[in-house]
Amino acid sequence: MKLGKFNILTAVVVTLLGALVSCSKDDGAIPKRIGIEDVPVITTNLVKNNGTLDTIFLATQGAYQGAIKVAMYFSDQVTPTKIDIVVRRNATATDVRVLQAGVTAFPTTINVTAAQLVTLFGGAALTSGQTYDVAPDIYVGDMKYQAFPAVGLGNGQGVTGMSTIGFGEYVRIRIRP
């Protein structure tokens, strides 16, 4: 009886050891049908050392001069083919306009005025409570990575807390009375 239990236990242990030793994970190289692209990390931050605020006050909107710095977060990365600086109104992905197209030099500073925002969105007056988000659409070769796509998250979005180390996925400009 003891010998039978010993044989069964031995058979189970040998089978488990054989299965453990025979398993390995080596899929080889990534197949060519799967494209992997190095998308550069672009940071978008408000330039605050020139007195720029993230708020446009309606009473003094004509005097608003915003400055937004667009730069490579990792300076040793390959730069994108180009980027377009886009603006999204009221966090609506279907209401996105190009503020400046074809930026190829990094870092660069983009100036924003209240008049530019009004013109960009068809002359509609600024109203209290509106928000305008400024971010880059990144082009790598012939691929475009949108800042504010109609579906899903845009480039750089989804990681929270990165502003503490200097990364900004977009700059939000608020309109106040």
Image: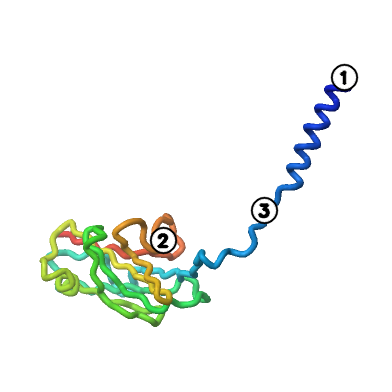
CA–CA distance between discs 1 and 3?
39 Å
Residue drawn at the location 86% of the way across and 17% of the way down? 1
> Could you tell me residue 75's position as x and y percent?
49, 75
Residue drawn at the location 37% of the way across and 69% of the way down? 44
Q: Secondary structure at mark 3?
A: loop
Based on the displayed image, in which of its 4 quarters is residue 88 positioned? bottom left
Q: Amino acid at mark 2?
A: Ser
Residue closer to the observer: 40 or 116: 40
CA–CA distance between discs 2 and 3?
38 Å
Q: Secondary structure at mark 1?
A: helix
> Could you tell me residue 85's position as x and y percent?
31, 73
Tag 3 residue: 25
Q: Residue furthest top?
A: 1
> Could you tell me residue 24's position as x and y percent?
70, 51
Q: Is residue 99 above or below residue 149?
A: below
Tag 1 residue: 2
Specify which label sits upstream in the sequence, 2 or 3.
3
Residue closer to the observer: 145 or 112: 145
Q: Amino acid at mark 1?
A: Lys
Residue drawn at the location 20% of the way across and 72% of the way down? 64
Tag 2 residue: 163
Asked whether the residues under the numbered discs 1 and 3 touch, taking CB atoms below 8 Å apart as contact, a structural biologist would say no
Residue drawn at the location 29% of the way across and 67% of the way down? 134
Q: Is residue 94 left or right of residue 140?
A: left
Q: Is residue 27 left or right of residue 138?
A: right
Q: Is residue 29 above or below residue 65?
A: above
